Amino acid sequence: MKKCTVLLVAIFALCIAAFAQEAVKATIENRPISELFDIIEQQTRYRIYCSPQAIDSLYVTVKESNIDPIILLEKVLSKTPLKASAFQNAIFILKEQLITSLPDGYHFKESSGEPDVKYDYLSTLDLTEAQKRQLIAESKIYEVGYKYNKSSGTVVLSGTITNVKTGKPMVGLSLFPDNSTAIATTDSAGYYSVKLPVGQQKLNLRGHNITDTKIQLMVYSSGTLNFGVEEFMFVLDEATVSSERLNNVRSTTIGRDRIKLQEVKNIPSVLGEVDVIKVVMSLPGVKSVGEASSGFNVRGGATDQNLILFNDGTIYNPTHLFGIFSTFNPDMVDGMELYKSSIPAKYGGRISSVLDIKSKVGNNQEFKGSASIGLLTSRLTLEGPLFSPKTSFIVGGRATYSDWMLKLLPEKSGYKDGSAGFYDLNAVINHKLNKKNSVAVAGYYSHDRFSFDSIQRYSYTNANAAIKWKHSFSDKFWGDFTAGYDHYGYETREREQPFNAYTLTFSVDQVFIKADFTKQLNEAHRLSFGVNGIYYSLNQGEYKPYGIESIVNPDKLQKEKAIETALYIDEQWDATSALSLNVGIRYSLFGVLGPRTYNTYDSGYLPSLSGITEVNARNGLFKTYHNPEFRLSGRYAFSSSFSVKAGVNTMQQYIHKISNTTIMSPTDTWKLSDVNIKPQKGLQVAAGLYKNLMLKSGLVELSGEAYYKTMTNYLDYRSGAVLVMNPHLETDVIAAKGRAYGVELMAKKQQGKLNGWISYTYSRVQLQQDDSREAEPINNGSWYPASFDKPHELKLMGNYKFTHRFSISVSCDYSTGRPVTLPLSKYIYQGGELVIYSDRNTYRIPDYFRIDASINIEPSHHLTLLTHSYVAIGVYNVTGRKNPYSVYYASENGVLKGYRLSIFGAPIPYISYNIKF
Amino acid sequence: METIGMYKLVLMGILLALTSCIDEYYPKGLDSMGDILVVEGIITNDTTVITLRRSVGISEDISNAKEVINASVYVECDDGTVLQNTTKAISGQYEIITGVLNPNSKYRLNILVDGDSYTSEFLSPIITPQIDSIFLSKAGAGRPIYTCVSTHSTGEDFSYYRWSYEEDWEFHSEIYTSYGYSEDNPPLIVEYYDYYNKLNNIYHCWAKGKPNSILLGSTEKYTENKIREKRLIESPASDSRFSVLYHVTVFQNQIRREAYTYYENLQKNVEQTEGLFSPMPIEMKGNIKCINNPDKHVIGYIEVSTTTCSKRFFPKSDNLYEPELKRFCYTSILDTLPPSPEYILISYEGGILSALRVCVDCRYRSGGTKNRPNFWPDN
């Protein structure tokens, strides 16, 4: 194997400012040069960018007046290796020639037998102006391959992109050549592989927090190009209020949104907290029943039909504090991907969507931290190398002090004795064994507790632990091996009177393993395949007396155990440069495990206690469901900026949330499919049009997607259903079917001073109880709207950057009111007023409309500062509109009244202060 | 489930604290639905009382609710016996003398009204166990006083109960006076009241209480087939009920699980509707149907069950009753006679002494009347 020479070149601009010269007056004596920079910045329009290490020992004496700042700097720096270069209103202080080497392990992939390749360090430094990419393009052509052994046709360029500052892989960057529809995205190791025609090429590099860059290439044959890029340092520079769908036109996936959390820090939020789930809910096609609900509905799916993964672990309850927050600490989250339509074959188990959340990778170069203080929560995150740069860690914690909220309640409310609180802890360790192997260990724990009086106490816990080993078999073949454990459980304790005090517990435990492989067969074929397995163990409910005086009868439902396994294979085939197909198949198998007793019912009737024909006791594997799931999608690109896509997906779901409330609540339980409860099935057909428009002020992406979806064996509840501690739940539920359809239109602009998106969605979701064995189906067996059916929805997210330090953000949300069931008639019975309800979901609450605004200020972002702070001041619900969460009638002392409940029925100002060190 | 209901209630408290955002609101554009027959009552031993009403539209005045007085109501036994209502219905109530229910027979209710014929399901009578005791309980100073009932069944299956009650209590005005306004000429004329003639003063009063919701209980969750302490009534510790003498009569019926579920759902539909996590309301069908028009909506579940009853007096107890200091109940000396019906003369001696009417005339306190129950003791 031949080691390649490494040449790192810093590219910087030597460009003369195109506007009128400015003059500076400076008098300082033997002071750090940074003070001179400050003077220049104060007196001119220039901003000075430099590396703090380069100037930290530089002291200068200057006595000048009316001098051009560039000339002054050139003068001052003439005896140093530094050079000042101006570009428009920026001055860069750089070393003239940076010839150095990157830390071991970051340069390149193994490339035995490959001809000479140049490795270049493309530094965009602090240049944020769009023009910079031309500078790069004009200043250097990178040669790829062996000049004297030219290939012809198309070759493959691969490599790894890292962050030059931290050494972390740059994940999710897109690379695409100008004159082709090929596209590559860096994976979690920063690795990319893109097809290029031989010859002179321009390769676009895009990412959420790097400058759009055009790399000029001279391609001779296949080769490797590893390089570092610099991420923006400043929060304000990252203020692209958008989900990343840069790949919209080129990728084959439909309905995918990729979000980097840093991008959304400027979105106005409730109480100043950036929230992962709230960000997801701002995307088209994602709805929720109301403001205080972290459960969300994707394209008409129920809240339990979303697979929420955090570092590969399944999160069953993503809610803190009644849904005001999600359980993910925003400082720990790097980014997430939401799959609404084309769900890759490697995911399965839920029929509506997949939300894959990844935590950050610790900085392996230096110790860093961040802290934030909000109205309700405080957070602390620390990261850094562990023993050596090969190992890094990141740990984060968040805790609340929301008890004060309850203390504000009036004495008579009865909740004065209440308390509420939560915390969550995260830890991730990454270790790079060698060039081919790396290991990551992630742990997560969150706990919520609340009580409103001395009678009832609630608590619940999510816990996850996972280990992941990444192995690269070769340049074109790599695999991830993951094993982990997930837990979710709750406990309710009630002590109204000593004799009826009890505790009720429920828990889900699961162990999972995954092996995922990716192989680049050739230029046109990329294969992904793997195997997943989950072992479930559910405590369906345990009811125990609490205290010695209690006469509550202890009761424990039998444990539910099952295995869910799946094999999948997924082929990405780029048939021509315009046509690309993705064909995936997943074969899932679900096996119910004993020991377990279950009832067999007379099949002519809905299961009921009077219809039991047999009681069975079984051991081992006694019931299996297995089904193929198809994931197909295709894209035809008419040009590099316009494409159409279509896809079909089928999904299976073997675990169901048992709740007759419309949103996720802390007392929801989950149930596995068994002999009497069949798996849910989902089918989605979707198609879309994608068009990118290049305007003067930046790229505008337009997209339109339409979908039609069906769901079967959706669990609905019979009249008088008992859902808690029910050993024969099948007698209280009924399988319903659902259909959903809609159109999502979106325009998005990610660059320029003004950025953001606007989206309009028309969508419907309806359910039907069509089991002929049910004598009184809901709404007489006709289709009725689901509780989250909100046909019209308009969302606007906008951010305007006045300067690097100051920006404003506005978000706006309109939707049709959700359906509710209201009483139509009332009567007196046993001295009180009672009601007769309409058919289910016949009426709607008033429409929802809200505007939020925030001002984001970064007092200073000098690199020399020890800490960087960031302040957001905003107002949630500026207009103070009382958006009803629900409209209902309730009886107080036998007298019926109508009410409207608004969760945030007034403008809520907030301020949050974040600090990075 | 009670737990969920509680959760949601308290959640509202929290949210209230955030932005106080529950207000009265009546949605417009609701379809009007009324005139649905509501059948209340249980076929029981001795006298079965069935009340028939018709529902009104949700936005109408409930006092317009029509009591059905033109119906014929029968209790039918599966041995062929048919018993009809004896008296003419007063305020929608029909009384049928049922006598002793035969445990080996089945009974049902038939109603003929406005050309429609309704019938309930044939059910055998449940023999309700006796009430073990009626008692008052209080968890500590300042906490509410609960009027409770306990009972137990010797049967092996879980038991389900429904209760009703009648309350009577005596209470007194804060301040005694011998005077009062004349009924005919309120501003001035003063009458003379005799303290010792309880029936002819404004110092001694009696009040009545009735349930305003369906009271249900079950032993489903317990190790014993026993209701230890079912709280029927919650009153503040300062309630006038407990200030002199309190009497309660509790009626108990053991019912079937189906009836329990039906009644529970009726009550839930007006109690657990408000919150974030409240279950979706459901209309359940009772066991009454319209024979000539099976699609016709009718409300009610006619259970067949014997009634047991228990009564008890509770004299004032310092352990329970915590009198509320009524700061506005003071006397003041006026130059002339009290200027308005708000005030009442107490005494002429040493000036014109008067006090607020609500402190002096017990009929102006909640529910106070001069209707002394027949069974009330003299002292």
Image (spheres, coloured by chain):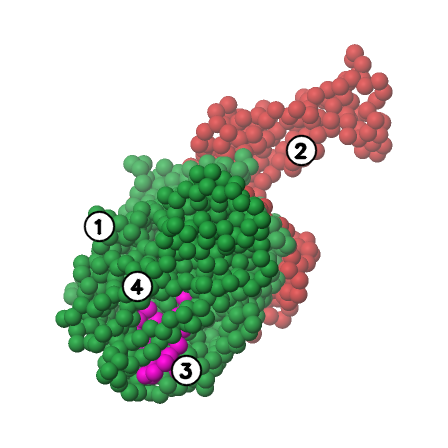
Chain colours: A green, B red
- Image location (x, y in percent) of residue B89: 64, 56
Q: Please report the residue visible at 17 percent of the width from the left and 73 percent of the height from the top.
A: A112
Identify the residue position indicated by label 4 in the image.
A8
- Image location (x, y in percent) of residue B134: 45, 36
What kind of element bears circle 4? loop
Under mark 4, the amino acid is Leu
Identify the residue position indicated by label 3 in the image.
A179
Was residue B123 drawn as part of the magenta stretch in this picture? no
| Mark 3–mark 4 CB contact (< 8 Å) | no
Q: Mark 4: few, some, or many residues within 10 Å (few <14, many ≥20)?
A: many
Residue positioned most to the top:
B350
Task: Tell me, yes or no, whether dots 2 and 1 are on the same chain.
Answer: no
Q: Please report the residue visible at 45 percent of the width from the left and 84 percent of the height from the top.
A: A639
Q: Nearer the viewer, mark 1 or mark 4?
A: 4
- Image location (x, y in percent) of residue A388: 22, 50
Under mark 2, the amino acid is Arg
Q: Earlier in the sequence, mark 1 or mark 4?
A: 4
Query: In the image, which residues are magenta?
Result: A180-208
Quadrant of the image containing the C terminus of chain B:
top right
Q: Please report the residue visible at 53 percent of the width from the left and 31 percent of the height from the top.
A: B237
Under mark 3, the amino acid is Asn
Marks 4 and 2 sit apart, C-alpha to C-alpha, by: 93 Å
Identify the residue position indicated by label 1 in the image.
A388
| Mark 1–mark 4 CB contact (< 8 Å) | no
Q: Nearer the viewer, mark 3 or mark 4?
A: 4
Using the image as rendered, state which of residue A109 and residue A550 is in the foreground.
A109
Give the chain of mark 2.
B
Identify the residue position indicated by label 2 in the image.
B365
Q: Please report the residue visible at 54 percent of the width from the left and 53 percent of the height from the top.
A: A68
What kind of element bears circle 2? loop
Under mark 1, the amino acid is Ser
What kind of element bears circle 3? loop
